[in-house]
Image (cartoon, rainbow, N blue to C red):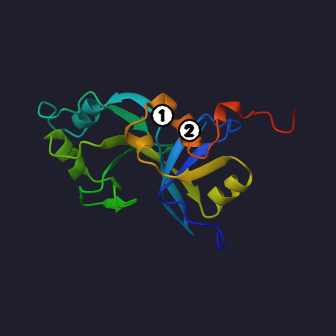
Amino acid sequence: MANFPSLVNHLLIAMPSLADPRFERTVTLICQHGPEGAMGVVLNRQSNLTVQHVLEQLDLPVDQTDAIHDPVFLGGPVQTERGLVLHDARYQYASTLPINEHLALTVSRDIMEAISSNQGPSRRMIALGYAGWQSGQLEQEIEQNTWLYVELQETIVFDIPVEQRWRQAALLLGIDIALISSQIGHA
């Protein structure tokens, strides 16, 4: 990783050839990246759960929030029982990790308490689990053309419909990813 830039605040875009069902056609926000490895949240895999389910599981009230019908995302295959919230960085909680000056990630219960009482951030994405890479693993996968990466534009997280995020993230690079063949070495 000595010559590899930090990818915090970047989107990983799965190449069409990536056949792993956990990451096929995903776009992942990198939240941490250093010599010890990387951690990110998949932005385009919705679960069949809503915020109401999560609040009920946490024994928090659901009758005061406008978020009960918001979808919960599958943030990645690691610690799928752990909830994470991507949100407006103006809100800070017990375990908030800033990603950039506008976006943060929180994994503590206090943000869910705030959401349950309609006091939390209105720009938010709730996910279960995260994507993780060991030291050097992500860099190796990028060198093997498993992923493209581009600097984050927050519209991908909060404004673009889920089913369009993968393609829209690639368009930030000027690439129509739907036109890239998943067949390697065949013309």
Asked if disc 1 and disc 2 are in contact, CB closer than 8 Å, the reply is yes
Kind of residue at disc 1 = Arg
Lateral position of residue 180 relative to residue 159, left or right: right
Query: Residue shown at 23%/49% (left/top)?
Result: 111
Element under label 1? loop
Would you name the residue on which mark 1 appears? 45
Q: Quadrant of the N terminus?
A: bottom right
The percent position of residue 134, horizontal first and vertical second, equals 59, 60
- Residue at the front extreme of this rendering: 174
Query: Residue shown at 45%/48% (left/top)?
Result: 153
Query: Residue shown at 58%/40% (left/top)?
Result: 171
> What label sits on residue 23 in the rendered view?
none
Lateral position of residue 4 relative to residue 102, left or right: right
Q: Local crowd at mark 1 within 10 Å, few (<14), some, or many (≥20)?
A: many
> Does residue 80 appear in this view?
no
Does residue 82 lie above or below 3 as drawn? above
Query: Residue shown at 34%/56% (left/top)?
Result: 102
Would you name the residue on which mark 2 appears? 26
Does residue 32 lie above or below 112 as drawn? below
Q: Quadrant of the C terminus?
A: top right
Report the front residue among 133 and 80.
133
Report the front residue among 141 and 91.
91
The percent position of residue 170, horizontal first and vertical second, equals 59, 41
Image quadrant where residue 139 sits:
bottom right
Q: Local crowd at mark 2 within 10 Å, few (<14), some, or many (≥20)?
A: many
Kind of residue at disc 2 = Thr
